[in-house]
Amino acid sequence: MVTEAVATPPATGHAPGRTGFWSWVTTVDHKRIGILYLITTLFFFVSGGLMALAMRIQLEHSSNNVISADSYDRIFTMHGTTMVFLFTVPVMAAFGNYVVPLMIGARDMAFPRLNAASLWLLLFGGIVMYSGFVWGGGAADAGWTGYPPLSEQSPGHGIDLWIVGLHIVTISSVIGAINFICTIHNMRAPGMRLSRIPLFVWTIDVYAFMIVLALPLLSGALTMLLLDRNYGTSFYAAGHYGPILYQHLFWAFGHPEVYIVALPGFGMISEIVPVFSRKPLFGYRALVYATVAIGFLAFLVWGHHMFAVGMSTPLQVWFMLTSMAIAVPTGIKIFNWVGTMWMGQIRFEPPMLFATGFILTFLIGGLSGIAVATFPVDLYVTDSYFVVAHFHYVMGSIPVFAVLGGLHYWYPKMTGRMLDRALGIRSFWVLFVGFNLTFFPMHAMGLSGMPRRVATYTNTDWNVYNQIATLGAFVLGVGVLMVLINCLRSLRYGRIAPADPWRGNTLEWYTSSPPPPHNFDSLPPIRSERPLDDLRREAAAARA
Ligand code: HEM
Ligand SMILES: [Cu+2]
């Protein structure tokens, strides 16, 4: 159902801007950079997904022998690294780039050239990491966490390329983050106070601060690893708590990373749910405070990844309690989304279906999170498939449901075409079934003792769970393919999108789809966090 907003000006015919291949390569327009970011990150998503399928084929039944143990190590390492660093974190920058300047009524990002640099550094860093597959003696194989002593002793240059690639990707993320911070804090339209910026902008702001604070820890840790491997230093020498030092540095970065990924996903949900429930967001302020609280608490909990290394009980208790404290602001978010839907006129358009699917799957991941944050439970399930189930329900539901939901929501704005609605709904159900088939049985595998990061297993009791998971992974793959086909086909055959196909609340729906190079001809007065809704009300009042 498509309804033109009463108060939106008609999409004016603008000169389309420069076209052609070279104009895209040299672009500094945030919208084009956003689209290129999206293409780059979706490409890495497909690549990480193909590696996941390869692993699932190998694990389909016990004592299978399709992939050698060595290759399996490289594949799960590069799968995890790709999904986290090359897809989920930068895809948020893709949407942030496209949407944030529009949402705050700005003409572009604060530093357009720096923005282009972030994009190309991301691609370059990814290529450096992947180059280990073709030279250097094999890609990195010490897990996405790269723990020493394994990562110190791994032969060849796969790990070195992985480190250098991650450094480049980190530079890309940090300069991108600085750009977001400067844009959000300096470039807002008149009237757009901080207390009126859309929730997605808030989450990108906190995401950016967290990137600036957390990623240097990773760079430091990895630089010492590179020095140990190549220049004879001994930061992480075994026997002197070296490997444990690495784990602390890694997870002091690594847990904030989870929320770096999660917060903008929450932001997308907070944009979609009110629009498709035809109600204002329930508790805007509470959601803002919850976002900031999560950003802060995320830096206090890293030890929950290390319960098994031998930690004193008071420390274990501290990390358990801080981890559980994060459940409070996260619970506030879920409560407020449900509160927004409550008694609303819900329209289950594809973006709303994805948002609902996200809330359900993320809730399951949150619940198993409480379980593994309880250290006696964690000691029982650590390094088992239960953990793999948990983090895919958290880290996997964000890209699959929140990001693809955001894609369905903003695609009309980005391309000027609507996605096929029926195909969108069908692809949601395929993804939802596939996701749960893949990851739910992993809880059972883990509880019955199947360790993670193994290329094969002999216990035939685990066969049935693994077969369901492998089937699910293929269903999930089909779902992703359906989304991609929808995106490509609609570029050409999709219905022309109006400026405001969903009756949105935020400024990006005030300009044409796609927006002109300068974004806005004029801006409406901004008196709340929902300027377009205000316009509609005023128009209705004037008519009455
Ligand atoms: C699209 C479907 C996906 C499937 C079928 C899948 C499957 C798998 C499998 C089989 C493993 C290896 C488990 C092991 O041997 O221990 C794994 C590991 C992992 N996955 Fe996924 N995955 C998917 C999506 C994702 C997404 C979207 C993310 C994250 C943002 C992600 C992040 C990770 C990480 C961090 C690891 C750990 C790698 C390591 O142990 O070093 N995965 N996944
Ligand atoms: Cu954590």
Image (tube, grey):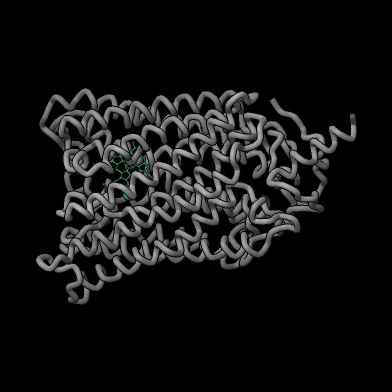
Question: Which residue is more in the foreground, 73 or 182?
Answer: 182
Q: Quadrant of the N terminus?
A: top right
Rendering quarter of residue 377: top left
Residue at 51% x, 30% y is 356
Q: Quadrant of the C terminus?
A: top right
Q: Tell me if 342 is positioned left or right of 223 in this view.
A: right
Residue at 45% x, 44% y is 329
Q: Is residue 130 visible?
A: no
Image x and y of residue 396, in percent? 39, 40
Image x and y of residue 353, in percent? 54, 28
Rendering quarter of residue 328: top left
Residue at 35% x, 39% y is 392
Give above or below for 51 relative to 462: below
Q: Residue furthest front?
A: 314
Q: Is residue 257 visible?
A: yes
Image x and y of residue 109, in percent? 63, 61
